[in-house]
């Protein structure tokens, strides 16, 4: 097995795994925020700001992996 085959196999798998993990994380974050808003509607602004910040960090993981995949795809 040479490095080109490993990259061709690993890049889509890594990107898919990162996107799957990001989707699970975002689903849990938004679901937990909706539960918290349902329990304390007065804290809506604080909960949404914290959720949006967390979602941005979760989404950054997939963007970093996508950039890495594009940069390594040129070596195939």
Image (cartoon, helix red, strand yellow):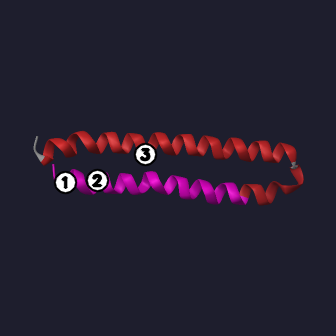
Q: Is residue 59 above or below residue 10?
A: below
Distance (Cα) linking label 1 and label 2: 7 Å
Residue located at (55% from left, 40% from top): 24
Where does the image place residue 38, in percent across and percent down from the top left? 84, 43
| Residue identified by numbered label 2 | 70
Toward the front, the furthest residue is 1
Specify the segment rendered in magenta: 49-76
| Residue identified by numbered label 3 | 18
Marking on residue 19 = none
The first of marks 2 and 3 along the sequence is 3
Where does the image place residue 27, in percent across and percent down from the top left? 61, 40
| Residue identified by numbered label 1 | 74
Q: How busy is the neighbourhood of tag 1: few (under 14 within 10 Å), some, or many (20 plus)?
A: few
Disc 3 element: helix
Where does the image place residue 61, in percent across and percent down from the top left? 46, 54
Residue located at (28% from left, 53% from top): 70
Residue located at (32% from left, 56% from top): 68
Magenta span has 71? Answer: yes
């Amino acid at each position: 097995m040479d490095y080109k085959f490993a990259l061709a196999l690993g890049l889509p798998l890594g990107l898919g795994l990162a996107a799957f993990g990001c989707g699970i994380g975002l689903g849990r974050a938004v679901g937990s925020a909706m539960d918290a808003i349902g329990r304390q509607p007065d804290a809506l602004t604080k909960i949404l700001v914290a959720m949006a910040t967390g979602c941005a960090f979760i989404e950054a993981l997939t963007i970093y992996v996508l950039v890495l995949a594009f940069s390594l795809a040129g070596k195939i």
